Image (cartoon, grey):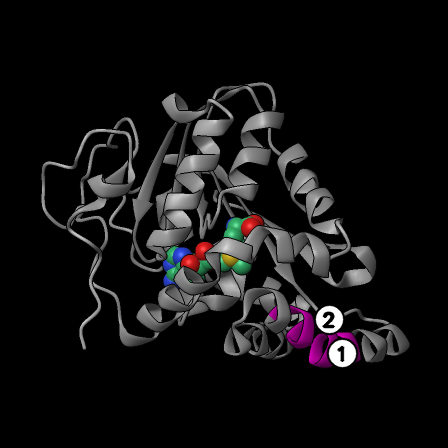
Amino acid sequence: MQCRPSSDPGAITSGPRPTKPRTNWFGPAALPPDGEAGARPGANWCGVGRMFDRIVRTYSLLNHILSFGRDFSWRRTLADALDKDRELKVLDMATGAGDLLVSLLRRNPNIAQAVGLDISENMLAACQRKIAGYKFTDRVTLVYADAACTGLPDESFDVVTMGFGIRNTPDVFKTLTEIHRVLKPRGTAFILEFSLPPNRILRRIYLVYLRYFVPLVGCLISRDRTAYRYLNKTIESFYRIEDFCDLMRKAGFSGVRAEPLTFGVVSLYKGAKL
Ligand SMILES: C[S@@+](CC[C@H](N)C(=O)[O-])C[C@H]1O[C@@H](n2cnc3c(N)ncnc32)[C@H](O)[C@@H]1O
């Protein structure tokens, strides 16, 4: 079965309906679409999007429970790393239910324009509601597209962020090169992602937590066994911190560094485009 972005996003947005089919712009104002936004995804893209569609109702709550509330501070750390001294145009990839996007906007009034991008329509709908609740609608556009192939114009953002999304993308390197492409020269990418604690004892304890506690609680609350098994598998199989930094350099980023958060269960990666 083929998986395509919906051609009727107007059903879930208070903004104007998109005029072009398959461009999939949500929100008050469409960005100038140089390329074709929402380029057709591959099969893997499709399955992941559907999985996130299913767990949307309990997604944010489970994040807070499973991280013991640390997820708020991880997002705040990223949000506080942005330049406060100039007007910014920001792209938040894998924006999900908008938790990182809201944190960015609340802590950085200098964000003049923000785009939230995701492959799950239900997540985008939840994000739309959250953005409206915080009265950020006039600064935000939501886009239904694959992070590895956004169709957004070259060199159009000062900052690209991605919170807990990159490990879900089928081709991580392609996603990094896409982030690099859409960044303006001297723009910065900030990527938050789960990692394994470097300390061996902590890592063992954390793996037990990931393999047994997370799927159990995730399944009980979301009623979706696969999604929270998928979570621990993707965390365990994701790049080691140094390897991910190398991959960022290979994708063209300079000054790459990783900041471990909460004993290294999460890392904040930063890289600049020269
Ligand atoms: C764990 S959630 C993170 C949401 C949000 N950034 C946060 O901090 O809570 C991951 C999101 O990535 C999205 N995603 C997964 N693969 C993607 C892809 N290839 N392109 C765009 N979004 C993707 C999912 O639909 C989901 O909403």
Report whether 233 appears left or right of 18.
right
Asked where in the image residue 204 lies, by quadrant, the reply is bottom right
Residue placed under numbered mark 2 in the picture: 196
Asked if 30 appears above or below 179 in the picture, the reply is: above
**Circles 1, 2 touching at the beta carbon (< 8 Å):** yes
Point out the frontmost of discs 1 and 2.
1
Q: Is mark 2 within 8 Å of ligand 1?
A: no
Report whether 244 appears left or right of 16.
right
Which residue is at a point 64% across and 41% down the rendered structure image? Answer: 78
Q: Which mark is residue 207?
A: 1
Asked where in the image residue 62 lies, by quadrant, the reply is bottom right
Which residue is at a point 58% across and 78% down the rendered structure image? Answer: 229
Q: Amino acid at mark 1?
A: Leu
- Which residues lie in the magenta part? 207-218
Q: Is mark 1 within 8 Å of ligand 1?
A: no
Residue in front for this viewpoint, 115 or 149: 115
> Furthest residue to the right?
201
Residue in front for this viewpoint, 64 or 245: 64
Q: Position of residue 128 (x, y in %)?
A: 39, 37
Q: Amino acid at mark 2?
A: Leu
Q: Which mark is residue 180?
A: none
Q: Secondary structure under badge 1?
A: helix
Task: Find the distance from the CA under tag 1 to the CA under tag 2.
Answer: 8 Å
Report whether 129 appears left or right of 265.
left
Q: Secondary structure under badge 2?
A: loop
Which residue is at a point 28% across and 41% down the rendered structure image? Answer: 12
Q: Position of residue 7 (x, y in %)?
A: 15, 50
Residue in front for this viewpoint, 55 or 118: 55
Q: Position of residue 226 (x, y in %)?
A: 51, 78
